[in-house]
Amino acid sequence: GAGVSQSPRYKVAKRGQDVALRCDPISGHVSLFWYQQALGQGPEFLTYFQNEAQLDKSGLPSDRFFAERPEGSVSTLKIQRTQQEDSAVYLCASSLGGPQNIQYFGAGTRLSVL
Amino acid sequence: EDKVVQSPLSLVVHEGDTVTLNCSYEVTNFRSLLWYKQEKKAPTFLFMLTSSGIEKKSGRLSSILDKKELFSILNITATQTGDSAVYLCAVGVLSGNTPLVFGKGTRLSVIA
């Protein structure tokens, strides 16, 4: 596709619900990144895939967060048993090579947990 | 711990003004510094800087890196209301799998 596509753009969840956020990277981009951006803050790294391999998940805040990219293209970030502190914008980015290459971002999914 | 600090955190200017946004960093094994513009949508890439003293320019925007003093500036001349956004600075390191480290951003508001 022309750019990184994320869906849904907005998600409202009740506390305790599970949510799944989708990222469709730029076609041919090897690397895919997930970031969490709280209000008034810069994006914070969550996890990184190179093709289908999850090379770094050190930024995932708890074991309720899980990401996958089974075929090396589309990725899903899943949050189980959502809590209010999970409310944030979740940004996905992709790059042609590794993290040292320019990362191109999607518009994000704004998650609100009530 | 790698750190990126941007200043000011917010700025209000009038159309036509020139602004300078600052980004300082403390990272091990610096590789590159990137600037992004974030409106109410995807952060869009502006510049990637790897070498000291070489200015990168795109229209009214320009940026330069000082690797000795560990900072970068982003200049915007003749600001327009469309420049209103959050400007993010991010640093990449040499370790292959290390992600970008972002600052908190500078919120620029340009008023007519």
Image (cartoon, grey):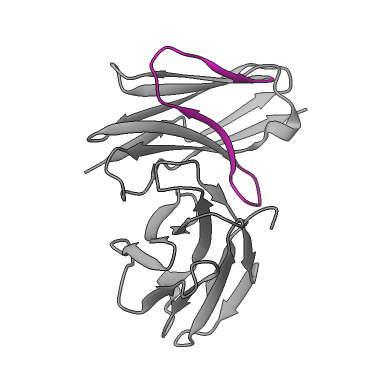
Spot occupied by residue B21 in the image (x, y as percentages of width and height): 50, 25
Residue drawn 41% across the image and 40% down it: B103
Return the x and y of residue A13 as percentages of the image width and height.
Answer: 55, 81
Residue A28, quarter of the rendered image: bottom right
Residue with the most extreme right position? B112
Residue A35 screen position, x and y as percent: 45, 58
Q: Nearer the viewer, residue A23 or A53?
A: A53
Q: Residue furthest top?
A: B53
Seen from the viewer's position, the closer of residues A36 and A56 is: A56
Q: For the magenta stretch, what is the residue range? A: B38-59
Q: Is residue B107 visible?
A: yes
At a point 51% along the width and 81% down the height, the residue shown is A19
The answer to whether residue A114 is visible is no
| Image quarter (top left, top right, bottom left or bottom right) of the N terminus of chain A | bottom right
Residue B19, magenta (yes or no):
no
Queried whether the magenta region covers residue B56, the answer comes back as yes
Q: Position of residue B53 (x, y in %)?
A: 42, 12
A54 to B10, vertically: above or below: below
